[in-house]
Image: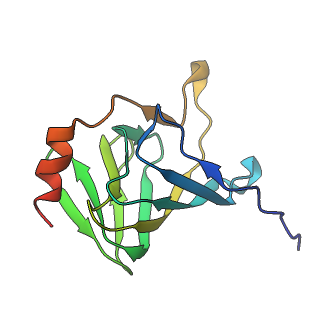
């Protein structure tokens, strides 16, 4: 057994997030085969559109959030879990007037040709965020 020191809390970079987002990595070592981060979203903060090569599981621990694909808006509440399939384009974040924290769990895969495990894309438009938030 080995105790792994937790790295410092990191601010979510502005090219990947809108608003203030903070990430505490729980597991992220390459030999683990998966990563887990506790992601803290301030009200209205959310990711850019993205997809994961190995899919992603999101488990809400507090607050109220959204997980959005091209076809679906899911309201995420504490204790609920959402799975996004490999390469499924989506975004997620907090409701407009609520904080939200979730555990983000992703498989770590080796990709050829310098591909990334996460494909970060464009920011969510304000109109698209508002339309999704109206579903709460």
Q: Position of residue 20 (x, y in %)?
A: 47, 50
Location of residue 127 by image quarter: top left
Residue 15, position as x, y percentages in the image: 47, 31
> Which residue is drawn at the image coordinates 76% and 56% (left, top)?
7
- Relative side of 43 to 75, left or right: right
Q: Quadrant of residue 66?
A: bottom left
- Can you name the residue that lies furthest to the right here? 2
Quadrant in which the N terminus appears:
bottom right
Count of numbered tags: 0
Residue 119 against residue 112 in the figure, above or below: below
Instruction: Relative to 65, say whether 107 is above or below.
Output: above
User: As drawn, is 104 to the left or to the right of 79?
Assistant: right
- x, y (%) of residue 28? 69, 53
Q: Is residue 72 visible?
A: no
Front-most of residues 85 and 101: 101
Question: Residue at 11% across / 49% down in the picture?
Answer: 131
Is residue 47 or residue 112 the one in the foreground? 47
Q: Residue furthest bottom?
A: 79
Q: How is the image coloured?
A: rainbow
**In the displayed structure, does residue 25 sit left or right of residue 69?**
right
Q: Residue at x 31, y 75 (%)?
A: 77
Q: Residue 120 location, x and y as percent?
A: 43, 32
Work out which quarter of the rendered image holds the C terminus and state it: bottom left
């Amino acid at each position: 057994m080995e105790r792994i020191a937790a790295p410092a809390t990191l601010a979510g970079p502005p090219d990947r997030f809108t608003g203030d987002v903070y990430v505490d990595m729980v597991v992220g070592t390459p030999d683990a085969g998966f990563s887990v981060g506790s992601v803290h979203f301030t009200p209205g903060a959310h990711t850019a559109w993205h997809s994961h090569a190995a899919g992603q599981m999101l488990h809400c621990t507090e607050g109220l959030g959204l997980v959005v694909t091209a076809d679906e808006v899911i309201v995420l509440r504490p204790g609920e879990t959402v799975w996004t399939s490999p390469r499924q384009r989506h975004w997620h974040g907090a409701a407009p007037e609520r904080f939200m924290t979730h555990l983000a769990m992703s498989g770590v895969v080796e990709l050829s040709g310098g591909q990334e495990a996460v494909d970060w894309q464009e920011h969510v438009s304000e109109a698209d965020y508002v339309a999704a938030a109206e579903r709460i």
